[in-house]
Image (tube, rainbow, N blue to C red):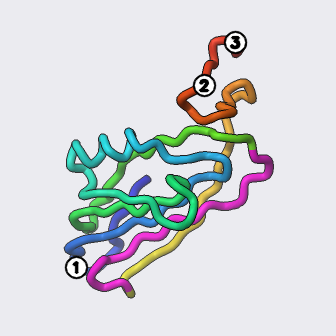
Amino acid sequence: MCAGLKRGEPTNMAIIELSSPSGYEFLDESLDELEEERRIVRWEPSGGNWNSQVNIYLDSLNNDNTCFTVSAYRDYTVTGHAKIRAKVYDYFQPNRKTETFYTFTESVPNCGICPFGRETCDQSGCT
């Protein structure tokens, strides 16, 4: 995930609203690590589905891209993934915003499915 301004003054605080691909949830540990490294200010789940939509708070955005990786795990298989929304906006001036949709190409083999969540996932039988 990368975000930055094309023009204008830097923001004081920015929010990224990020949705996960269908069947996936963001890993708390991945987001907590970004917070501990001070790459993000904080994060919180949003919407009705826990960890499939998150708000990520940044200190600021400027003309340089701010990039980081957010890990997710597959909870169940979904075919024909729809485009996924990502929205970035200035916390204090919400009219300064952009929204984009990204596509997802699944590269995990079917044996990688965790039927009862990632805590019970045993992939030792995968070939």
Q: Is residue 21 above or below residue 100?
A: above
Q: Position of residue 111 (x, y in %)?
A: 72, 24
Instruction: Answer yes or no: is residue 64 visible.
Output: yes
Q: On the rendered structure, is 115 left or right of 117?
A: right
Q: What's the magenta region?
A: 78-94
* Residues marked 2 and 3 touching at CB (< 8 Å): no
Q: Is residue 61 above or below residue 80?
A: below
Residue at image location 50% in from the left, 47% down from the top:
26
Q: Amino acid at mark 3?
A: Gly
Q: Amino acid at mark 2?
A: Cys
Q: CA distance from mark 2 to mark 3?
A: 11 Å
Point out which mark residue 9 bears: 1
Q: Position of residue 102 (x, y in %)?
A: 60, 59
Residue at image location 34% in from the left, 57% down from the top:
43
Q: Nearer the viewer, residue 107 or 110?
A: 110
Q: Residues within 10 Å of mark 1 (few under 14, many from 20)?
A: few
**Kind of element beneath mark 1:** loop
Which residue corresponds to mark 2? 121
**Kind of element beneath mark 2:** loop
First in sequence: mark 2 vs mark 1: 1
Q: Position of residue 95 (x, y in %)?
A: 38, 87
**Kind of element beneath mark 3:** loop
Q: Nearer the viewer, residue 4 or 95?
A: 95
Q: Nearer the viewer, residue 77 or 61?
A: 77
Residue at image location 35% in from the left, 68% down from the top:
15
Q: Residues within 10 Å of mark 2 (few under 14, many from 20)?
A: some
Q: Amino acid at mark 1?
A: Glu
Which residue corresponds to mark 3? 125
Instruction: Answer yes or no: is residue 108 visible.
Output: no
